[in-house]
Amino acid sequence: MAKVEVETRGDVAVLKLSNSPVNALAHGVREGLQAALAAANADPAIMAIVVTGEGRAFSAGADITEFRSGMKPPGLGQVIDGMEASGKPVVAALNGLALGGGLEVALGCHYRVASPAVSQLGLPEVKIGILPGAGGTQRLPRIIGVEAALDMIVSGNPITAAAAARAGLVDRIAEGNVVDAAVTFARELIVSGTGPRRASDKTIDAAAVPAGLFDKKRASLGRHPSGPLAPKNCIAAVEASVVLPFRDGLKRERELFAELAGSPYARALQYAFFAERQAANIPDIGAEVKPREVKSVGIVGAGTMGTGIALAFLNAGLPVRIVETAQAALDKGVARIRETIESNVARGRISADEGKLRSANLTPSLEFKALSASDLIIEAVFEKLALKTQIFGKLDAIAKPGAVLATNTSTLDVDTIAAATKRPDDVVGMNFFSPANVMRLLEVVRGKATSKDALATAMAVAKRIGKVGVVSGVCFGFIGNRMLEAYLEEVQAMLLEGATPSEVDGALEAWGLAMGPNAMMDMAGLDVGHHIRQEHQISDERRRLYRFTDAIVGMGRHGQKTGGGYYKYGGDRKRQADPEMEAMIRAEAAAQGVAQRRPEAEEIVERCLLRLINEGAQILDEGIAMRASDIDTIYLTGYGFPAWRGGPMWQAENIIGLKVAADKIRGYEKVHGARWTVAPLLDRLAASGGKLADAGAEQKPA
Ligand code: T1G
């Protein structure tokens, strides 16, 4: 239950924010804090006040789940202002992370003592499409300076306790228990007669603010991951702290906050926050299913994926054994892993000791039996079913009982691979996204025979290595790549109709995609898709649409790695339009008799988005995805879809509308034929007024 616990230590009152698991500042906490502060100020026996948090957090900030339900008074800003006005000194004991409103509570305290272990002190509101709305944009600049505050608030990135001490945000780093240290600090204040030190009493010397600071910040925003609104308002709020008196600045902060609170971008970002966490919940696997312990990992294949996966585990501190069939390939893979670790050391991302530890945790071998003691073995070899089934047969013979056997396949049938073993219940898909040590998405593919604890193990491992695990059923391309195929197919159609790669990519990147499809395919390698199309039965329509791309692959134009694909590339990997290649598309279009036109940017975006939505609805209807928000989480964490747009399914439900989407798709079907057949689920929901969010096996995120 959300509350504030009060403990008296002589003449110091210790107020503890209590709301498991991260002391979100729900109504009970706000009300409790306000009451406890009033009582402490009224109590003549109390000379100072300490505020701290229960458990691992000081506070993660406002309770985001309250945003939609509305915040009952007292508002957080009001509680903090009251605390700052306290006649007795208030000391924050930062026992753990203090984020958003949590840090704003600490800023309203007169002094701050932090445990050295605290790694997250920040104002991440911009990451959920809003801005610090409880005085943070006015107090932080007064405490650490305008420039530092501007960077923290616009990036939303936290700093450590040590950095906070250097910045003047923290007055003392505790030795030992942080509450004890804060009580000691409070006693020193009492003895020395030092009263409250209020941030709001400080005025900012506008002349000391670097000229053009705010305009430069606005100009530098570029493609901020929170979209076009929130960062801009964050800058305006900090600017107000310089040009307005404190009270007026607070008022301006509230106005700027209100502009954001209801925006579709904020709603999308907050949806994405919860959707990512909801993905970990598997309806038929409760807490009673215990993941198997994974203390060592084996990897088969030291190619691009195998080495990326190895790095993901080494970075998480796990020992890795990696095997290859040939020494040269093994040496090349090990060298790539070691180079990456060393470059992280060189860039100061990790210490030299940490780098040494990670390298020491890697054991290369040419022998499969080197993996016989591994708790989890991940196969990451070439995307050929025959090869994978052969490898799983071998693994079955050497892997210890209880080992989880995972395949990194991105399209192939996990059930067929599992059937190559005598332990199909131990087999699961773990589809990493390249670069596997960077991309956060991990599609966890549940085969028909996959046991609950093997699946739970894969999901637990995903979280442990900092990935977002999302469960998929078995179908060609699982969730992400199956939707990507539909999207890319539409791109091929538009190229044949007359759009250039730059126009297609430009339209989608302007809409928010991290990278346009043609540039993305050039980066991944056009030969990869070509190989998959050779390996699998595809429709005549898809074969026709890809005839041009398959032709240029045959000419050796594989994309960036060969200096040219849809674009041509200089040494700097910068894409340049390639008139020769565009002429080849025109020739192919003429050969096919495709009527020429130039789709506008709006149509390009609409057709690509609707293909994603239609395929996603079909995937949801087939039960391949458990819920619509899982599909969005996959697109946000694995495909560069902008989180401030929520995801394809969120767009369909909240921006386009399901009925409009179904009608538009039907309209495109009239022009372009069967690839635009409306997914029956969309039609059903459009007719019934139902929601995609309620369509899956599990309800929508909080
Ligand atoms: N509100 C509600 N629930 C929250 C929450 C929050 N602020 N933060 C976390 N949770 C839930 C989360 O959904 C999950 O629930 C559980 O806690 C554990 O979280 C006025 C208006 C704190 C770094 O943006 O970044 O303050 O799935 O799985 O990986 O200016 O949660 O267990 O049911 O993420 O250890 C600003 C958001 C709010 C911080 C912990 N604060 N939270 O990460 O665990 S706006 C934030 C996080 C605000 C003021 C404004 C992370 C974390 P469940 P978790 P974790």
Image (spheres, grey):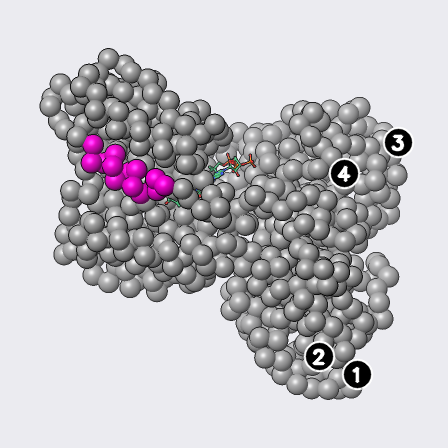
Image quadrant in which you'd find residue 30: top left
| Image side of residue 62 versus residue 134, left or right | right
Is tag 3's residue or tag 1's residue first in the polypeptide sequence?
3
- Residue at left offset 77%, top offset 48%: 623
Residues at badges 3 and 1 in contact (C-beta under 8 Å)? no
Residues at badges 1 and 4 in contact (C-beta under 8 Å)? no
Q: Distance from label 1 to label 4 (Cα)? A: 43 Å
Q: Position of residue 476 (x, y in %)?
A: 79, 54
Our reading of the magenta stretch's main secondary structure is helix
Instruction: Name the residue that disc number 2 marks.
Output: 496
Residues at badges 2 and 3 in contact (C-beta under 8 Å)? no
| Image side of residue 143 versus residue 393, left or right | left
Is tag 2's residue or tag 3's residue first in the polypeptide sequence?
3
Instruction: Name the residue that disc number 3 marks.
Output: 422
Q: Which residue range is magenta in the image?
A: 73-86
Is tag 3's residue or tag 4's residue first in the polypeptide sequence?
3
Instruction: Name the residue that disc number 4 marks.
Output: 428
Q: Which numbered tag is attached to residue 630?
A: none
**Badge 2 element:** helix
Q: Position of residue 537 (x, y in %)?
A: 86, 61
Instruction: Name the residue that disc number 1 marks.
Output: 592
Q: Is residue 82 magenta?
A: yes
Tell me if residue 276 comes above or below residue 639 in the rendering: above
**Badge 4 element:** strand
- Residue at left offset 28%, top offset 60%: 214
| Residue type, numbered disc 3 | Lys
Q: Residue furthest top?
A: 10
| Image side of residue 339 versus residue 142, left or right | right
Q: Distance from label 3 to label 1 (Cα)? A: 50 Å
Is tag 1's residue or tag 4's residue first in the polypeptide sequence?
4
Q: Distance from label 3 to label 4 (Cα)? A: 14 Å
Residues at badges 1 and 2 in contact (C-beta under 8 Å)? yes
